[in-house]
Amino acid sequence: MTLPKSAPALSRGPLPARAASRLGGRVWVDLVVAAAVLVLLYLALRLGQGGTLRFSTARDAAVDTDPARLPYDAVRSLLRMFAALAVSVVFTFCYAYAAARSRRLERVLIPALDILQSVPVLAFLSVAVSGFLALFPGSMLGLECAAVFAIFTSQAWNMTFAFYQALVSLPPELDELSRSFGFSRWTRFWKVELPSGMIGLVWNGMLGFGGGWFFLVASEAITVDDQRYALPGVGSYAGAAIAAGDLGRVGWAIATMVVLVIGVNFLFWRPLTAWAERFKNEQSEATEVQRSVVLDLLRRSHLPAALGRALRPAGRALNRAGRVFGTAGRVFGTADRRPAAHPARRRAGDVAFALVSGGIVLWGLVDLGRYLSDRTGLGVFGEPLLLGLATAARVVVLVAVATVVWVPIGVKIGFSPRLTRIAQPVVQVLAGFPANFLFPLAVWLLLRTGVSIDLGGILLMALGSQWYILFNAIAGAMAVPADLREAMDDLGVRGRQRWRRLIVPGIFPAYVTGGITASGGAWNASIVAEVVTFGGTTLTATGLGAYIARAAEHGDHPRLLAGVAVMSLYVVALNRLLWRRLYRLAERRYSL
């Protein structure tokens, strides 16, 4: 058996003398990398000081829209985005691993993830602002934590779905390899499972980062219970400029966002996607690979290798600790071969787990019903149920059109490293750019053309959710081994036959991840797409998103809960009827 590139060698020999000499002469590379790290630490410390200041609602709710403040606001927003990304990665590893490795937890965690991705960011904010302000009374840190939490809720779900899908569709030969070598859970995770899902994780992380930009305005300029909170940031700046109808300052915000998105792509995501190429599971080297100037610079520097040597003792200690859990795997059946459990004991465990989890859910539903009955009556669900049909129709049309348009484009990009280098910055700018920054233009176009917001809302929702399908199609195509594509070329397989035999099986698991997250993202985007405001003009569509947005703005908690519950019901129903079945099909038939 040939070890794939996703299973790096446990040890590496010394570099050749010529390579060592060449690296030794690159002292300036080390200086550049060290200087960049020091600058990043300095900016983080300076900006972090602003998060501990005292907060005054009357003073700080107003946003200064002087363009001279935009550089500072932009870096504050960037710091929140990366803090949320770090939380999202940790959440993804823990949540997806638990769902993929425990049959009983999977029955709870995956449906819960369906619900979590359908809960609007505004609903999370209503809880987060109150909770974090109570935790840090009078401090800006409470608002900062609430903003980071809100951005996290727009980043994490598609990353978690992608990594879960990679874990459950792990190639059998890699699974057998890890078992035959007696890997501990820790070693198995870092050497087999994480590399197997790295490409999808990186691309969905990049897409989740773009989703964070989309909800930046809602995260930094918060209106809850008719009370306004604002944080320094490019999102709150843009929100204030849009509310004032100042097109000039909206233009400054748009220009700043373009610079931020391109800069983050060049300095962070482009090196990551090029680095992730090493985790392709293929037998032959690709003729073309992605390149990154930043990644090449890091590879030529001594500092990453020195950092790796410094952390190596900690890695060995964690690996030894993982051996303890690996031994426990013989009992719990995760790291080693699953034991043959007694059927009666297994059924008893399933019944006990179902009773406990079902009892907790039932208790919560009864308490929720009592709360709504005391305040508005259970008839409050009637209006959002009807409005949800309108939003559901928009979501279905959006996903269908996005599939037809973006899957072929994504496959074309993913199969060509040269085209990926050209298209990735463009796609990243389009996906990462907050579409609600363009809503003033949308209002103007809808008013000039006479198109109803009920129809135009589909386009506005698509601006924030169609990229999930495109990015996952690219990631799926990139993960198809080059030797399989070359074999198809040698056999002369083209056109429809190539799609049926290679492309669809190769990208199908990634597409399902993109489809389910695009669907959930479209429901979430309806919150900002069905109510569009610029200056004194507000366009409101008929739909569940507009209903929830009104309830959140006025602090109408019963209707907010009813709207969120109905939206979750629609999302879970769609996932159960369509996406879950496609997930099972991907597990059974389409894993490389």
Image (tube, grey):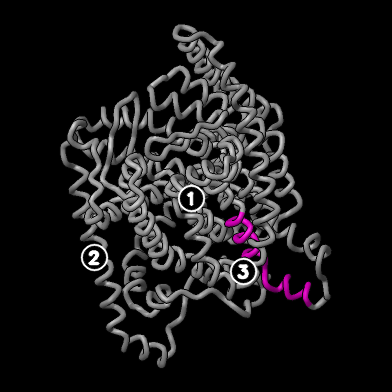
Mark 1 belongs to which amino acid? Answer: Gly
Q: Total number of numbered labels?
A: 3
| Residue 267, percent from left and from top | 39, 67
Q: Quadrant of residue 490?
A: bottom right
Q: Secondary structure at mark 2?
A: helix
The mark that comes first in sequence, 2 or 1, is 2
User: Rounded to the nearest whole Å, what is the CA distance between mark 2 and mark 3?
Assistant: 38 Å
Q: Earlier in the sequence, mark 2 or mark 3?
A: 3
Q: Nearer the viewer, residue 452 or 505?
A: 452
User: What residue is rendered at 62% in x and 70% in y?
Assistant: 3
Which amino acid, by three-letter code, is at mark 2? Val
Q: Which residues are magenta?
A: 470-489
Q: What kind of residue is marked 3?
A: Pro
Identify the image quadrant of residue 16: bottom left
Is 486 magenta? The answer is: yes
The mark that comes first in sequence, 1 or 3, is 3
Question: Which quadrant is the C terminus positioned in?
Answer: bottom right
Q: Position of residue 246 (x, y in %)?
A: 33, 47
Label 1, on which residue? 208
- Alpha carbon distance from label 2 to label 1: 26 Å
Q: Nearer the viewer, mark 2 or mark 3?
A: 2
Return the residue at label 3.
4
